[in-house]
Image (tube, rainbow, N blue to C red):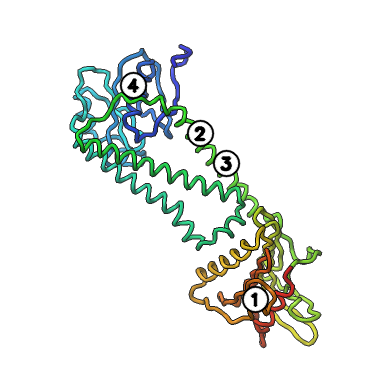
Amino acid sequence: MRGNPKIRRIHRLPPCPAYDVEAMESWLSAMAEQGWVLEQDGFFFGVGAFQRQAPQRMRYRLEAAPRGAGMWSENGGHPDPEAEELSRQMGWKYVASRGDFYIFASDQPEAPELNTDPAVQAIALKKVRSNARASLFFTLFWAALWPLLRLHGAFWLTAIHIGLPLTLLSLGLMLWSLGRSLTKAAHLGKLVRRLRQGLPLEHKKDWRARAARRRGEFFAYCALWALWLCLFARLWALDLGEPGKLALRDYAGDLPFASMEDLIPGGQFIDRDFLEGKTNTVSFRSTWLAPQAISLWQTGSVQGEGQSLSGGLTVEYYRARWPWLARRLAKEYQRLDKARNRDYYADLDCPSAQELGVDYAAAYTAVFPTATLVKGNVMLRVYFYQTKDPALPLSQWIAVFADGLR
């Protein structure tokens, strides 16, 4: 551990979490015995900074911080001046803080313990445990409840949009973070129960047994977060660049679904761009869950065979990997539309799936008439508004989209 004598300062990742009070105290004492003493304010982002000194017997004690020990807490995360002075008179010096704890050190063998009453220590740890519970509920909310509320249960639509790797990685990190919070709350609860029974803390706990595992978990956790940030940045860049987006006038291929010009026999579409670069566009993308996904946005008018219509159309098309996923996407879209347009939402009568020759059909108004169709592993969501009377009836235009679905 001592290594090169020219090295005067080292940084070490603790082999135990901050809330494992006994292991932290034992590890810091072991470092001092090998000639490495924790620096003043020597913890930064969980990593300890140590200065080389003569090997010595140094006792360390972790005291629960009643108001938190973070840099944004009161007194900058330091103990109250009165508490520091009292500790100094007893032979103890405040050194640093980590997590919810202040770290005190003493090189005086005769210095009395800072806290000898287990009941008093239990009261102090109870506050830290309360903070841990609050953190657990906060983690649970962001890991489970918030996505459900924000996404309105549209898990599969989100997974297709952000990609399966980022989805699985996000779920894994959420569960891992939740597990870390649960472990912290359980460990602190165990300590509080021991102290309430009058049992003192073990100041010479064996920290080596789990040191390698603890450090491995830490580096794996950080590496996964780094990977998550890279994937998220890539997704963000793709969303900004929109590499699969084309102006309709520049697209010469066939679409696997109907568009506005198909709503009137012999129809000719005349575009009207009221949002330059946004309307009258078609976008293509592919993910593992949906090998083919197409978004279409048309605005304009259609003329043909003595008929005309005008308005706007948006279509979301997914060729999903499985038929059950296509049906799931249709229901998620309906749930999303209902949640986002609650004041306008209403179910609409439409021909049955059997009449339309599809496996699933639903229609509703979400500000404007909307329909979802499923045929095999293909899902189509059609959002269609008309600005000219007489309007094309729902039963007529939904049949056109059902017939053109492939």
Question: Tag 4: residue type?
Answer: Ser
> In terms of secondary structure, where does tag 1 sit?
helix
Across and down, in percent, residue 398 comes to: 67, 78
Residue 235 position within the rendered picture, expressed as x and y whole percent measured from the top left: 62, 50
Numbered disc in front, either 1 or 2 = 1
Residue type at numbered disc 1: Ala
- Rendered residue at 54%/78% (across/down): 347
In terms of sequence position, does the residue under pointer 4 or pointer 3 come before the other? 4
Q: Residues within 10 Å of mark 4 (few under 14, many from 20)?
A: many
- SS category of the residue bearing label 4: helix
Mark 2 secondary-structure assignment: helix
Q: Assign the C terminus to one quadrant of the image.
A: bottom right
Work out whether residue 231 or residue 137 is closer to the camera in this orientation and state it. Answer: 137
Residue identified by numbered label 2: 219
Q: What element carries label 3?
A: helix
Upstream in sequence: badge 1 or badge 3: 3
| Quadrant of the image occupied by residue 108 | top left
Q: Dot 1: within a 10 Å radius of its alpha carbon, few (fewer than 14), some, or many (20 or more) residues?
A: some
Residue 29: mark in rendering: 4
The answer to which quarter of the image holds residue 183 is top left
Distance between the alpha carbons at the discs numbered 2 and 3: 12 Å
> Going by the image, does 317 lie left or right of 188?
right
Which-is-in-front pick, marks 1 and 3?
1
Instruction: Quickly name the residue at label 1.
Output: 353
Marks 2 & 3, CB-CB < 8 Å contact: no
Please give the residue where the numbered disc 3 appears in the rendered image: 227
